[in-house]
Amino acid sequence: MQLIQTSVKHYVEAQHSKQMTYEESIGALMTRIKRIERESEDLRLGLVNEQLKSHQDTLTGLPNRLAYQERSRLEFLRARRQKTDLTLAIIDLDFFKIINDNYGHKVGDKVLRHSAQLCLRRARKTDLLARFGGDEFVALFPDTSAAGARHICEDLRCLVEQAAFQCQSRWVPVSVSIGVAGLQPGETLSALFERADAALYTAKRRGRNRVQGP
């Protein structure tokens, strides 16, 4: 009987030891899984942050040219598929080189940021306003006719013209010229951009500080 009790005791102790070892292994595994999950989440957030940076203009904080190109392709395909309106506007600061020459590039950068914020104030949440390069911006208006977008751009133009920008106790005049074009049946995205660009140059030839479009 004593031998049986001893064997049972040893068996129970061995099983308990195995259970403890198993629980420790499970605990270590769970800790490792949580660490991997945290590292994966950190990596995901890092990638998202890098992607956001790659789509953002560092000077103005607006979406950049890459962001415009990606969004415009999506909106173009959607407009074609759903047969909805899509309008593009190209916005250019008037005499920006003169501002840089007279006041310096630091002031020129401030004017760009100032103008970008004014444009954002008028843009709707569904619109895309992006810095295309230099002193040129693009605005994409989904589900909006050329006439509707032109009305928005006229408000934007007036807002920029009337906003006061002061530098070194001097008022710096700022205005924009804008070319507007609405997507036509069978037209490509590049052709739409070319027509908006042509409208912009017409606005400049006609005296600047104006909206030109259909």
Image (tube, rainbow, N blue to C red):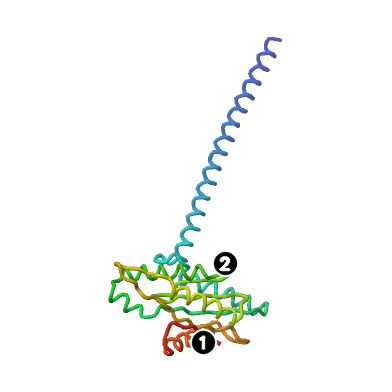
Q: Mark 2 points at which residue?
A: 125
**Residue at horizontal 48 percent and vertical 79 percent from the top:** 90
The crowding category of the residue bearing disc 2, from other C-alpha atoms within 10 Å (few below 14, some 14 to 19, many at least 20), is few
- Numbered circles on residues, count: 2
Q: Residue 109, percent across and down?
A: 35, 69
In depth, the one of 86 and 25 nearer the eye is: 86
Real-space Cα separation, disc 2 to disc 1, in angstroms: 25 Å
Instruction: Label 2, secondary structure: give it.
Output: loop
**Res. 2 mark:** none
The N terminus is located in which quarter?
top right
The crowding category of the residue bearing disc 1, from other C-alpha atoms within 10 Å (few below 14, some 14 to 19, many at least 20), is many
The C terminus is located in which quarter?
bottom right
In depth, the one of 3 and 98 nearer the eye is: 98
Is 6 left, or right, of 61 in this rendering? right
In this view, the residue farthest toward the right is 1
Residue type, mark 2 in image: Lys
Is 156 left, or right, of 12 in this rendering? left
- Mark nearer the viewer, 2 or 1: 2
Q: Residue 177, percent across and down?
A: 44, 81
**Residue at horizontal 60 percent and vertical 25 percent from the top:** 17
**Res. 195 mark:** 1
